[in-house]
Image (cartoon, rainbow, N blue to C red):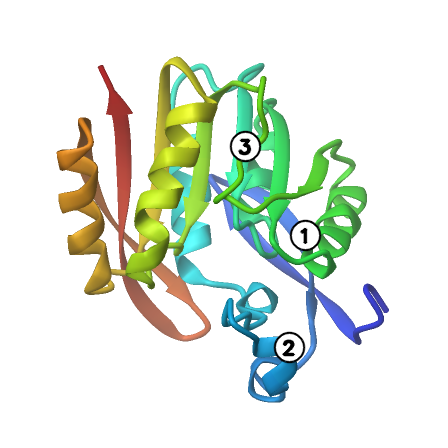
Amino acid sequence: MIAHLPCETDAITIAGQLLLLWRPIEAEKLVLETTQSAFGEDERLPYWAMLWPASIALANFFVALPEVSGKRVLELGAGLGVAGLAAAQAGAHVVITDWYDEPLEFVQGSARLNGLEVETRHLDWRFPPAGEQYDFILGADLLYERRNHAPILACAAQLLAPGGRLLLSDPERHPSLFFLETARELGWTFVAHARTVAWEGGTFATNCWDLSRA
């Protein structure tokens, strides 16, 4: 039991390296059984409990970059923390964040399984912390609601070090087109890297977006 939820371990491979992961059993049921009071004005659904193919794509994309070891990395809306854990496995100094507290317990459990050290922290990207800077900010499958686009970009603009990069993965959801329009208007440049992920008997098309500002 982690975060008072029945759980199981899963094994995935990121760039040839085995990564063990704790995740809730019957995650879909957890989403469907969310009460109206828990849903609330902020429309909180526990999507964090599901292992999204876009997180695997982002993890593979990041660890394939040159010179990631020793870099300061922040993962936003991490859920089960696949990208952040893979970054730590590649030698980066990683802070893994989420809006929920439960996934952070799962991330710490997974970190222990893999012998990794990561910092976990509750973070609402609408209110980024002051006085911190990162070389990379990671986010997997965060663009499904347009209302989040500007806050994500503002958070990254505040927290990225000079020359830093915002790396996002998205499974070709329609709202991502609006995100890119907003990013361009705010002075971001970006390059798309198409990826496919084989997962649970299916193949999922994913874009990994590499964004930076002058």
Q: Position of residue 104 (x, y in %)?
A: 71, 51
- Residue 44 can be seen in this image: yes
**Left/right of residue 4 with respect to residue 208 in the rendered view:** right
Q: Which residue type does callout 2 highlight?
A: Ala
Residue where numbered disc 1 is placed = 20
Q: Residue furthest top?
A: 162
Badge 3 crowding class, 10 Å Cα cut-off, few under 14, some 14 to 19, many 20 or more, is many
**Left/right of residue 99 with respect to residue 41 in the rendered view:** right
Query: Which numbered disc, 1 or 3, marks the residue that appears first in the sequence?
Result: 1
The residues tagged by marks 1 and 2 sit, at their Cα atoms, a distance apart of 30 Å
Based on the displayed image, in which of its 4 quarters is residue 123 positioned?
A: top right
Badge 2 crowding class, 10 Å Cα cut-off, few under 14, some 14 to 19, many 20 or more, is few
Q: Which residue type does callout 3 highlight?
A: Leu
Residue beneath the point at 21% across and 38% down: 183
Query: Regarding mark 1 in the picture, which secondary structure is present there?
Result: strand
Residue where numbered disc 2 is placed = 38
The residues tagged by marks 1 and 3 sit, at their Cα atoms, a distance apart of 20 Å
Query: Which numbered disc, 2 or 3, marks the residue that appears first in the sequence?
Result: 2
- Residue 34 can be seen in this image: no
Residue beneath the point at 27% across and 33% down: 210
Above or below: residue 10 compared with residue 82 = below
Q: Which residue type does callout 1 highlight?
A: Leu
> Which mark is nearer the camera, 2 or 3?
2
Q: Position of residue 48 (x, y in %)?
A: 57, 63
Q: Position of residue 133 (x, y in %)?
A: 52, 18
Based on the displayed image, in which of its 4 quarters is residue 199 positioned?
A: bottom left
Q: Position of residue 84 (x, y in %)?
A: 57, 39
Above or below: residue 205 compared with residue 64 = below
Q: Quadrant of the N terminus?
A: bottom right
Which mark is drawn over residue 74?
A: 3
